[in-house]
Amino acid sequence: MNQEYTLIKASRLIDVKNSKVINDAAVLLKETKIVSAGPAASLKIPTTANLKTLEYPNKTIMPGLIDCHVHLISLGDGRAGDDLNLLPDEILTLQAAKNAKLHLQSGVTTIRDCGAKNQTTFMLRKSAEMGITETPRLILAGRPIAIIGGHLSYFGSPATGATDCRAAVRQLMKDGADFIKVTATGGSTRTSFRHHASFTKEELTAITDETHKFDKHVVAHCASSEGIENALDAKVDTIVHCMHIERDGTFKYNKELTKRIVDQGIYVNPTLHAIRHQVWHLENLKKTKGLSEQEEVDYKSLRDVYENHAELVSRMKDEGVTLVAGSDSAWLNYKMGEFPHELEAMKSIGMAEIDVIRSATIQSAESCAIDDQTGSIEKNKSADIIIVNGNPVEDISNLWNIEEVFKNGATVTKEQ
Ligand SMILES: [Zn+2]
């Protein structure tokens, strides 16, 4: 069989491995894989009739975006997780399919889903494998492991004691989980205690130890310093939110925890816009309808939380923490297909554009343990590539303007 080659040419290509931009660049694909990339003039082009050439003047070639934190089943209509959970699995699975497509069309070729109800996301993957629906590359946790009544416990995997924790990991592995998500503190779940640690160190360690036995990684939700400390002791691989908050809800930067995060090589997904979008939502409401007394209180407190968290994330960055980009959409009102909001928020805390791009590609791939397959434009990696109008290294907001998306070498259909 003759193999198909595709040559993609553009004004520039972003080499995220070496943090540089290559002008007048091209990338050569052979079916689903990347053969070579670099200055167009330097590429060895096969002399075959099966070569298709695509040219994108004034545009940028870069790796497909990797959103390392999504919740595919969420509606993005503001409803709390406690209420989302009441919807039947069939509806949630359809919503997941819709969200997956939205994100893919917006240039996100890989997503790591950090928690869904029952088998919903596993069924989505099955449908995609059957060709029923098109999704980005899916890295799935399935159900998060939580304490009874703890954050996200309603999704179906509460566990108590080290033995139960190991059993929960084994069951998820059997169901098809690519990694384990654990809620190490409370969160928005009404029966949880937001800033208190949930699992004991012994339980959390049982979860990470059991997961690592399967060569998989653990992502821990931490909304307080107490949770971060437990997660560090248990040797988790990625911390999400990573909020330096005391039990009483006050922010207090903990330099020692930051040092341990750096020393242990743990990735931090700061979910900035996940907080900021709630501020924006209330700001909008204030302008259009006005706020109730309670909403006014929430607005002030959320603004405060965002400012504090953003400042502490900036300090973590300055002290050497590797930040990875993850939106946490479509939780609450943060709709999917709007990943650039998070990237703009990361830029706003003082990250250079190229570093934001790295955090949303190669570093995100590393934190998802898939950097051998995707995350950069390199020989033998999957052809997960996007074409951007303009230059996102000069202005990150150009990532709102995606011209074309290739997943595994195939262009993504743009209907709807
Ligand atoms: Zn989340």
Image: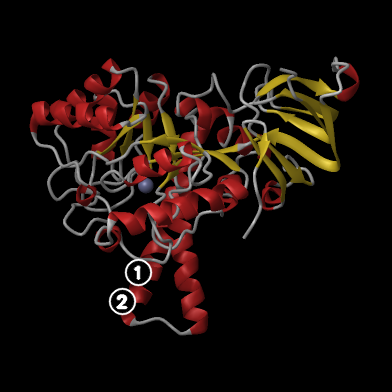
Q: Are marks 1 and 2 in contact (CB under 8 Å)?
A: yes
Name which quarter of the figure residue 140 lies in: top left
Q: Write the residue at 54% across / 50% down.
A: 101
| Location of mark 2 (residue) | 294
Residue 234 at x, y percent in the picture:
24, 24
Q: Position of residue 10 (x, y in %)?
A: 84, 35
Residue 231 located left or right of residue 14: left
* Front residue of 96 and 218: 96
Q: Specify few, some or many for label 1: CA neighbours under 10 Å numbering under 14, 14-19, or 20 or more.
A: some
Residue that protrudes farthest toward the bottom in the picture: 289
Tell me the quarter of the image containing the N terminus. Answer: top right
Q: Quadrant of residue 22?
A: top right
Residue holding disc 1: 298
Residue 213, picture quadrant: top left
Instruction: Give the total of numbered labels.
Output: 2
Q: Nearer the viewer, residue 168 or 132?
A: 132
At numbered mark 2, what does the secondary structure look like: helix, strand or loop? helix
Q: Residue at x 62, y 50 (%)?
A: 106
**Residue 278, above or below 228:** below
Q: Nearer the viewer, residue 208 or 96?
A: 96
Q: Name the amino acid, label 1.
A: Asp
Residue 355 position, x and y percent, is 62, 34
Q: CA distance from mark 1 to mark 2?
A: 6 Å
Amino acid at the residue labelled 2: Gln
Question: Does residue 217 appear to the left or right of 202 in the view shown?
Answer: right
Q: Indicate left or right for 42 with 34 as reference.
A: right
Q: Is residue 162 left or right of residue 217?
A: left
Foreground: 299 or 238? Answer: 238
Query: Residue at the front extreme?
Result: 1
Vertical placement of 321 versus 398: above or below?
Answer: above
